[in-house]
Structures are given as C-alpha cells and as structure tokens.
Image: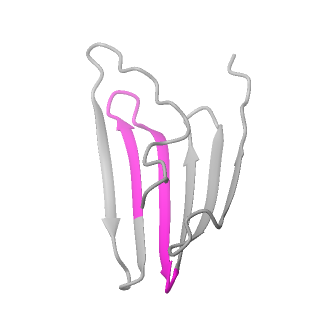
Amino acid sequence: MPGRASRSPLPTPAAVAGQQVLSLNLSFKPTAKWQANWTTTYDRATHTFGEHFLRLERDLHRWHASFAFVKSPNGNFAFTFFVSLLDQPDIKFNYEQQTLQNVP
C-alpha cells in the first residue's frame, strides 16, 4: 500500500564481529483477506531472542487495516494501528504508541 512504512519503528543494534545471529521470518495468509508476518532475530551465542516484529493486515472491502507491534530486547515496545479508505487515501486513521526505557 502506498504511504505505509515497511520498516520497523525501532532501530536494531549493530552486529558485533564474530556474533552469530539468525533472522527468522514467518509470513502467511490465514484467509484471503488476512495477512500475518512475524520477524525476529536469535543470537546463537547468548541463546536469546532479539527484536520481535509482528504485523497483521486485513482488507475490509474498500478499507485496509494494519496493526504492527515491535518489542526490542531491552523491553522497549511500539505499536501502530492504521486504517485507510482505498478510494480516498486522505481519509485515514493512524495511531502510534511506544515506550522508551532508560538502558543502564
């Protein structure tokens, strides 16, 4: 869809030399109108997951809805909810919330 960001709202940390990180991506369509996508990273050295990114999208006849949730390893999270009218893209509703915690 035009006008929708396809990147994560929270930056990912830079890779450390010698670090083995796996990137996992699961994408599927449970029905003709629903689409789901889950992306995460896994550090093989520390046996921990990194950032989680979940996106759900739904076509609602002439409307399109999108929900995205991101959680970083330090506990910060963000989610967005976006609904737009396909015939009139200027008619839309966009909501975003995020936390930023102090990292020691």
Tell me where residue 30 sits by quadrant: bottom left
**Image height check: is 101 above or below 97?**
above
**Image height check: is 72 above or below 90?**
above
Front-most of 92 and 100?
92
Percent x, y of residue 97: 72, 48
Quadrant of the rendering where the N terminus is positioned: bottom left
Front-most of 42 and 12?
12
Magenta range: 37-62
Tell me where residue 98 sits by quadrant: top right
Q: Which residue is drawn at 49% across and 53% down?
A: 3
Quadrant of the rendering where the C terminus is positioned: top right
Front-most of 22 and 39?
39
Classified by dominant secondary structure, the portion drawn in magenta counts as strand
Percent x, y of residue 101: 73, 29
Percent x, y of residue 4: 49, 53
Q: Residue at x 58, y 68 (%)?
A: 84
**In the current view of this chain or complex, which residue is farthest to the top?**
17
**Image height check: is 101 above or below 34?**
above
The way the protein has been coloured in the rendering is one colour
Left or right: 62, with 96 as reference point? left
Q: Which residue is drawn at 40% across and 72% down?
A: 35
**Image height check: is 11 above or below 78?**
above
Q: Which residue is drawn at 37% across and 39% down?
A: 42
Front-most of 14 and 80?
80
Left or right: 32, with 99 as reference point? left
Percent x, y of residue 10: 55, 35
